[in-house]
Image: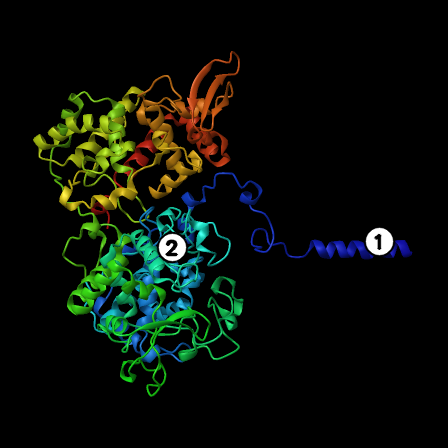
Amino acid sequence: MYDKEQSRKKQSTMDNSAKCPVPHGGHTQVGQSNMNWWPKALNLDILHQHDTKTNPLGEDFNYREEVKKLDFAALKKDMNDLMVDSQKWWPADWGHYGGLMIRLAWHSAGSYRTADGRGGAGSGSNRFAPLNSWPDNTNLDKARRLLWPIKKKYGNKLSWADLFILAGNVAYESMGLKTFGFGYGRPDVWHPEKDIYWGSEREWLAPSDERYTNVENPATMQNPLAAVQMGLIYVNPEGVNGKPDPLKTALHIRETFARMAMNDEETVALTAGGHTVGKTHGNGDAANLGPEPEAADISEQGLGWMNHKTRSIGRDTVTSGIEGAWTTNPTKWDNGYFYMLFNHEWELKKSPAGVHQWEPVKIKDEDRPVDVEDASIKMTPIMTDADMAMIKDPIYRAISERFRDDQDYFSEVFARAWFKLTHRDMGPKVRYIGPEVPAEDLIWQDPVPAGKTGYDVEAVKAKIDAAGLSIAEMVSTAWDSARTFRGSDLRGGANGARIRLEPQRSWVGNEPERLNKVLNVLEPIAKDAGVSVADVIILAGNLGIEKAIKAAGMNVKVPFAPGRGDATAEQTDAESFAPLEPLHDGFRNWQKDDYIVTAEELLLDRAQLMNLTAVEMTVLIGGMRVLGTNHGGTKHGVLTDNVGALSNDFFVNLTDMNLVWEPTGENSYNLRDRNNGAVKFTATRADLVFGSNSILRSYVEVYAQDDNKERFVRDFVAAWTKVVNADRFDLVS
């Protein structure tokens, strides 16, 4: 009996255990993902992000059409009202939320970097990790909640991305600045962006040394990063690695702002203009703050840095740890920043939170700002190490002196720089929406004149056909013209034909000798026809593909949309195009140099920047290889005996089990016949990954099927058309 009873109890325990809830993927505490098991596997997630399944508004929703229905005037009135409608749960400093809202806009836009065009305000991603929990973004969660009634009221007609920047604009206007303008049109994303590399550090504010070859030389910061520490927008306000030294800080300011496309004058204007209003917060013990939003308790409902131990609002708020206002009148746009900076001697002190800050040695009582809650209390103004850099660095000082002596000039430069900061990642002006879009064309917007549309496309195509260019020459030139497009900041692309201008004409990746040959043929054709070179380049590429399709025994037309224009050298900021230079292009099986990053990872990065899906990447690789478009005419990955015919041979040979691959170097392989050992083809990792990666191989197998030859051609044409039209914002709403 005893044995039976024990057996029964044991079985009962096992049964109950088996009935415990199993999370099946929803569990976040334990478990291993595929990337944990196989960390070297190619992660295709960056090509699959922002799937329509994550968008609650559905795939038919078009924000750019919805925002045009907005009552812009009513919205602006509501925003102005909000600025002075102080809430007890998070009261406004001096009864005005301007400083907080400017910081929200600034930090939304300030993550932008020119190296890859990623970051910035264009997607509203400040709502999600990691940005919503960066140390530099402490308490911006409160700004977003203060804006919720506005978002709730205007709903789908107003994106969070637009609202964040609009809040900064209205804040400045309500405090007396005449802004340069504003453009709506930033659609929201619905989950964290997976493609942005923020650094390899595993702790917030890890020492700067980790992202520099030599921290004494700011230019050695790891690309594409543009901030000195993990979790910061630009520089540490206390100094390099938290050690005050304005001259060293100045060097890092110059580098970080340059990586955000700002020159010295814009940098000084933005620093001064950002600190003309508002204040820093460090009147308390930062140790009393709870965790950031992503780590906070569920009861906090997405808010972070909550202080349940002491009073933590108003004058007792702790954010950066630095405490004080920069100017006498922190809710007024004036020249108070330069007055304060130049008319006082400054000494290094510690805030109540124990953070380094600069305070005046001596100051008149009338120059002191008042307390945020009690106007009868006078406070001590402060400067950060970054502020001190504005007068210690000789270049910055000269600019600061000019701004000090000419308030109107300072206001104009700042307004333009602020507009650039908040619109840099929006692409060309044609994408701006609303009544406040400036009429002026700005060079950083990469302006392109409108092109001709009503011409005889077939007649121009016939002239190109008669010119005797090869399929590879036509397709490669069109591809090189279009591949510079970056979905991150919507720069680059074929429109404008800047491939015929410097610096692009001399880029190694564009094969200058071949490029010049092709342009010398196509430019006269464009001139004779009275159409743009940009159109003729793409039309030639389309012609090459149509000829390759016929060579494969099919007849499929490649769509063509005329209307591209030709940018001039005067419309082109040559220096700003340097970051767009391709250092690698897996689609043409080329790398400028050997890199630590593998060829397949580089290919993945370019595909993501071009807004391609994994399937589109696959089909383009297969087509470009058999068209013979490799850089320099190399044969790697050209898995066909019929080069120039748009066949599915690349996929067929990649899946042929009669063939076996052997490495011949770090990024080179031979394909041998299993029976006789003869070398049939060569390849790189950018080729072989399509057979080795299980997801990519599943696509390859589809296109290798005998019944999918025409599907491959049609899918290639669709992907090609997407690439060459990526920057045709005039074709979409």
Please name whichever residue, 211 or 241, is drawn nearer the observer in this view of the structure: 241
What residue is rendered at 15% in x and 27% in y? Answer: 520
Residue 77 picture location, percent across and down: 24, 73
Which amino acid lies under the numbered mark 1 shown in the image of this protein? Answer: Ser
Q: Which quadrant of the figure contains the N terminus? A: bottom right
Give the numbered dot on residue 731: none
What residue is rendered at 40% in x and 71% in y? Answer: 322
Q: Is 421 on the left or on the right of 680, as rendered?
A: left
Sequence-first tag of 2 and 1: 1
Q: Is 3 on the left or on the right of 287, as rendered?
A: right
User: Residue furthest toward the right?
Assistant: 1
Q: Is 567 on the left or on the right of 262, as rendered?
A: left
Q: Are marks 2 and 1 in contact (CB under 8 Å)?
A: no
In the rendered image, which residue does mark 2 sit on? 227
Give the numbered dot on residue 7: 1
What residue is rendered at 37% in x and 39% in y? Answer: 607
Q: CA distance from mark 2 to mark 1?
A: 64 Å
Residue 426 picture location, percent across and down: 27, 53
- Asked which quadrant contains residue 325, the reply is bottom left
- Asked which quadrant contains residue 6, the reply is bottom right
User: Residue furthest toward the bottom?
Assistant: 376
Tell me the SS state at disc 1. Answer: helix
Q: Is residue 155 visible?
A: no
Please name whichever residue, 121 or 359, is drawn nearer the observer in this view of the structure: 359
Which amino acid lies under the numbered mark 2 shown in the image of this protein? Answer: Ala
